[in-house]
Amino acid sequence: MADGMDRDEGWVRQVLPLLRLIAKGYFRSEVRGMEKVPDGGALLVANHSGGLMAFDVPLIGVAFAEQFGTGRPLYTLAHDALFLPGIDQIFPRFGFLRAHPRNAVAALREGVATLVFPGGDWDVMRPSRDDAKIDFNGRTGYIRTALEAGAPIVPMVTIGGQETQLFLTRGEGLAKLLRLDKLLRIDATPLAFGFPFGLSLGLPPNVPLPSKMVTQVLDPIDIRAEFGTDPDIAEVDVMVRKHMQHALDDLARHRRFPVIG
């Protein structure tokens, strides 16, 4: 079993009504195709949006619970920052796991659906102009994880998260200057504009605007069935990102106005 697989269904049930209110009431969330997630272990691969106040995780979690019930766990691979002293006993109860390949493989082998954002902080801090752009920053570990666990990949894309405030720059240079890449494994410190603090480097955090967020779940991918017993990692990654980019482009074409949707 993966280290930290401490999800508590009772805690999830208690917080779900609040998360549903935020998802459906504030962000007017639409998640399409969740029924495509197969039974058993599946690696849900998504783009990441919203900066330090990213809400795509609870939106996906609400839709997953509505489709499969709270009895089927969904684990999310998360940055070490969510496991700092003082909060390290909270997030694991809601299904968060440290983002380590060992934990991901163990969870998938346990037959658990597991959500990963390969782009991580690089992706979630991207400028708003790149809202409809898939960028994993060259990270392909998610493919090796799926192969080692023998699990299918289920790509999904979300649009609208980078409209919750105006992200002006990713801030990778500042992150290096402050040595955040070495100290906290953070590759970006974005300059953003929002309410009520105006220009901000993430702290204090601005209140996310009620941007309409739409998520599309794509068809599962059985890597070995499509690429053979010894697949080329780079080739698989190109294919996954291509499928995701096409789906995100389609969502962008149907989006009429920023924030409003």
Image (cartoon, rainbow, N blue to C red):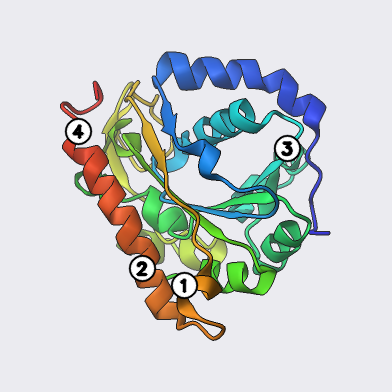
Q: Which mark is residue 239?
A: 2
Q: Which mark is residue 72?
A: 3
Q: Characterize the local packing of mark 3: few (<14), some (14-19) or many (20 or more) Cα atoms within 10 angstroms.
A: some
Residue 114: percent from the left, percent from the top?
63, 51
**Residue under pointer 4:** 254
**Residue under pointer 1:** 226
**What is the spatial separation of the Cα atoms under label 2 and label 3, in whole angstroms?**
29 Å
Q: Amino acid at mark 1?
A: Glu
Q: Amino acid at mark 2?
A: Met
Residue 247: percent from the left, percent from the top?
30, 48
Q: Which sits in the foreground, 256 or 154?
A: 154
Q: Amino acid at mark 4?
A: His
Q: Amino acid at mark 3?
A: Arg
Tag 3 near tag 4, CB within 8 Å: no
Against 243, is 5 above or below?
A: above
Against 126, is 8 above or below?
A: above
Q: Which sits in the foreground, 160 or 240?
A: 240
* SS for dot 2: helix
Residue 197: percent from the left, percent from the top?
33, 26
Tag 2 near tag 1, CB within 8 Å: yes
Against 157, is 206 above or below?
A: above
In the rendered image, the quadrant that contains the N terminus is bottom right
Which of the 4 quarters of the picture holds residue 244?
Answer: bottom left
